[in-house]
Image (cartoon, rainbow, N blue to C red):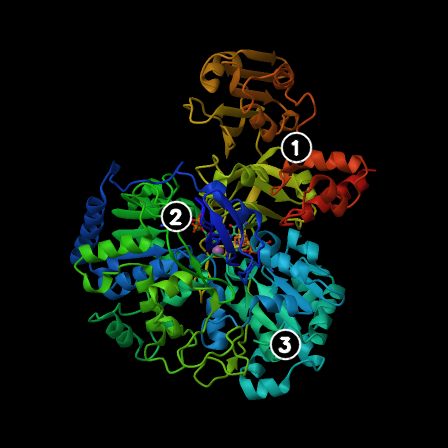
Amino acid sequence: MTGDNNPTVLTTCPYCGVGCGVAATACDTRGDQAHPANLGRLCVKGAALHETLGAEGRLLAPFVNGQEASWPQAVTAVARAIRESVARHGPGSVAFYLSGQLLTEDYYVANKLAKGFIRTPHVDTNSRLCMSSAVAAHKRAFGGDLVPGCYEDLELANLLVLAGSNAAWAHPVLYQRMQASARPGRRVVVIDPRKTATSDLADLHLALRPGTDTLLFNGLLCWLVDNDAVDLDYLADHCQGFDQSLAAARAEAADLASVARGCDLPVDDVATFYQWFAQEPRAVTAFSQGINQSSAGTDKGNAIINCHLATGRVGKPGASPFSLTGQPNAMGGREVGGLANTLAAHMDYDSPGARERVARFWGTDAVASGPGMKAVDLFDAVGRGEIKVLWIMATNPAVSLPETGRIREALARCPTVIVSDCIRHTDTARYADILLPAAGWGEKDGTVTNSERCISRQRRFLPLAGEARPDWWIISQVARALGHDAGFDYPGPADIFREHARLSGFENAGERFFDISGLAGLSEEQYDAFEPRQWPITRVLARDSRRLFTDGRFATADGRGRLVPVVSRLPARALSGDFPLIVNTGRIRDQWHTMTRTARSSRLLAHRPEPFIEAHPEDIRTRSLVPGALATLTSAHGRFVGRVRATPDQRPGEVFVPIHWNDEFTGQGLATALTDSLVDPLSGQPDAKQGHATLTHWPAAWHGRMLVRRDRPKRWTADYWARQTLADCDSWIVAGRSPADWRTAVTDWLGGPPQLVMEDVRAGRFRAARLRNGQLEAVLMVDPEPDALPSMDWLASCFSHPELDDNTRRGLLAAKAVDGDDAGNLICSCFQVGDRQIQKAIGRGADSVAALGRELQCGTNCGSCVPEIRNLLLAATEAV
Ligand SMILES: Nc1nc2c(c(=O)[nH]1)N[C@H]1C(S)=C(S)[C@@H](COP(=O)(O)OP(=O)(O)OC[C@H]3O[C@@H](n4cnc5c(=O)[nH]c(N)nc54)[C@H](O)[C@@H]3O)O[C@H]1N2
Ligand SMILES: Nc1nc2c(c(=O)[nH]1)N[C@H]1C(S)=C(S)[C@@H](COP(=O)(O)OP(=O)(O)OC[C@H]3O[C@@H](n4cnc5c(=O)[nH]c(N)nc54)[C@H](O)[C@@H]3O)O[C@H]1N2
Ligand code: SF4
Ligand SMILES: [Mo]
């Protein structure tokens, strides 16, 4: 800490599972130079954290049935609902839906209250949608939910296989580490049906048919055997299940040609991948949602792990399977036992003696009797009316669960929905009977665990916003109102952490690898000063915890790793004539999930300001669609309207849509309206990567841009809209299906009569601006062609002029920046460089990413825009 007014506090980023250390003040966030995950680096989301911290839009007080309430009133209301429901319908009528974005301390207390004191087994988490297939695969193979490797392995590997991971956008700092460790002979294989920003790093990109990963890795297992590349000693000494697994693989993947056919890949590419894998002992396969979010996700995970066990490449430097976790505390949640099928501290309900042990430790008579319902089943039960009280914390299921229409009906039906969130308006909050204001990042203290099992502190450096309170405090207050004073009288998060650490070592003679009992005695000061450390951290031995299973001993009863026989399986729902396209869904670079935080930063929203649909040019042509125009995807459950992006990076017959937009930010942009509730039978994880839909033109009669100075009342609606938050104004990209008579409507749109007006009635062009004291107050631009309109950034910049000059007035009427200062669509978020600027610099002779970096700075900070800069360079050379 420094001694000035704005002390720097070391904390951890609240976004992805990389878990970067952040040196934060209220007005700045930088990379923590000493944090082992990032060594000073941050991606653009982390670097923009301070822009998302304002009080605007925050939930600042509890609400009970729509009325603002005090904390005692809100706590009483929650406790009453739970008590009455338990009395009338039993403990199973109460459910908790938690999140990998809770801190470990919050999570621990929620799990303890639910399973140990209310005794409902129905505690699940959004990690079900995220990591549960990897968890199930780990348990099958290793006997526990254990990630063997560490980040350094991604750098040490001479062969880096990225399966179903767009790390360049989803784990940017890890991707930077992978980039920085490039060297002659280091090879990267990307396995993803789409060509992504991550493919930029690939020596080989396998754009396989979606869902065929198991076939590909089964083929690899056969190839390894046929080419004497398996480690027979390792298999004999440390594994089980090899023969059966090989037999299963042989049955479908005996020869290259059948694998290539099934995966829809060139035979040579498959052979190259197999050769590289066979030759290179230092191989890491990092996998993420392209593997997990599948109706066969657990099998996919085990198909990968099988190949690593067969070659003895588990838990060795530069050699391991590596599950990249999504959320900042996905791992912490797994550690406390937040999933419905787990109990606590890596103990399952069926672990011998576990229920009694946990009950004894918690000082309660009994814990819930067996596994609870997993997320999709849980919401089905809510829909059937079986769950009477549902407490949702730090997740937005009305957006993130599949078949969102059904989820919303279930929420509407549930007698008491309690939502703890930091944000006032979310799609889920609309269904809340009780809203509880949670402290946000920077306002609370606790710990998170990242993808490499590294526990880091999140530290407080801001005052609590309004009446917001940390989640652990809220849960403890409710517990005490329910009469459980003794178990929940925590003075602070350090006490909870110590208890959690103690439980991990309680009656644990080494059979549970998750053991952090070495931290059970941390003093308050030590907890405050705690530096990032990987578990296990036991009392007795201070062994190197960077890697697990280094000695070939696994967490199974006999200590052997298990190869699991798997055969590939595509989703049960096949394509039909009505819905002929596969809908792939995923992340974009600058947004975080349902946008509640990242959309508050205007520069983060500039990269992709609207929902979009990426499709192959062929699919666009055959449907007579126009790139840059709007289109509709229709599934059996709903619709998605977004802007068409034509790209050969997409396989024909498949489209990609982002998961981020929701009813707060657009009219119809829910990716989950297109995906099914089809789950993996073992993990219960929904298949979020294979929805089915049909794609049609959205007939727009006009396109518009609408910007109004912040917080002016809105008196208009449009058939299509996408909201943006820009520096001084609220802004919308809009479109309508039928021609509008602007002369009569414009006062409503602008909030008053305009001073500048230009109209070309026949051509359907209209521009109007309203000024107040010479300053821009509102502007509306309408055109039949979306491309004819200027960039939002330039329009927004006009709001910062204290008085509009002549040039800008002329520009507003002409709908373009007169002096050409329109940067275009944002490419580099760090330095705010747009595509028009880059194109101009290329025109002036900048002929490489480095040259552009020197001239414009673009791409020189976090580097996540480099693939896009390269595409602009490529497009410019192709155009010549
Ligand atoms: N910017 C940003 N970063 C994030 C997040 C965010 O919201 N925004 N969220 C975080 C979270 S919680 C998570 S879980 C991670 C997710 O991180 P990732 O898993 O890397 O991200 P996704 O975009 O969901 O999906 C990855 C890729 O899987 C591919 N895929 C689809 N189907 C298949 C298939 O059948 N096989 C294979 N091999 N690949 C397939 C998709 O085309 C996509 O490119 O990101 C984390 N990081
Ligand atoms: N189609 C499709 N669906 C998907 C996915 C996909 O790829 N495709 N990905 C899935 C995955 S991997 C994930 S992880 C989920 C993510 O989906 P969600 O978890 O639903 O998304 P978030 O926007 O992260 O929701 C977090 C909420 O918690 C609030 N919040 C933030 N910090 C705190 C806090 O400290 N306390 C409390 N109480 N609240 C807080 C935020 O404001 C926000 O409303 O989506 C899943 N759904
Ligand atoms: S890589 Fe992940 S943890 Fe690191 S700064 Fe970016 S979002 Fe935060
Ligand atoms: Mo996730």
Q: Say if residue 196 shows up in the picture.
A: no
Compare marks 1 and 2 and give the one earlier in the sequence: 2
**Which of pointers 1 and 3 indicates the residue nearer the eye?**
1
Compare marks 3 and 2 and give the one earlier in the sequence: 3
Real-space Cα separation, disc 1 to disc 2, in angstroms: 34 Å
| The C terminus sits in image quarter | top right
- In x, y percent, where is residue 684? 43, 62
- In x, y percent, where is residue 876? 78, 39
Real-space Cα separation, disc 1 to disc 3, in angstroms: 53 Å
Residue furthest right as drawn: 880
> Which residue is the site of mark 1?
824
The residue at label 2 has a CB less than 8 Å from ligand 2: yes
Name the foreground residue: 497 vs 654: 497
> Which residue is the site of mark 2?
440
Name the foreground residue: 622 vs 183: 183
**Which of pointers 1 and 2 indicates the residue nearer the eye?**
2
Q: Report the amino acid beneath label 1.
A: Gly
Real-space Cα separation, disc 3 to disc 2, in angstroms: 52 Å
- In x, y percent, where is residue 564? 53, 76
Q: Report the amino acid beneath label 3.
A: Arg
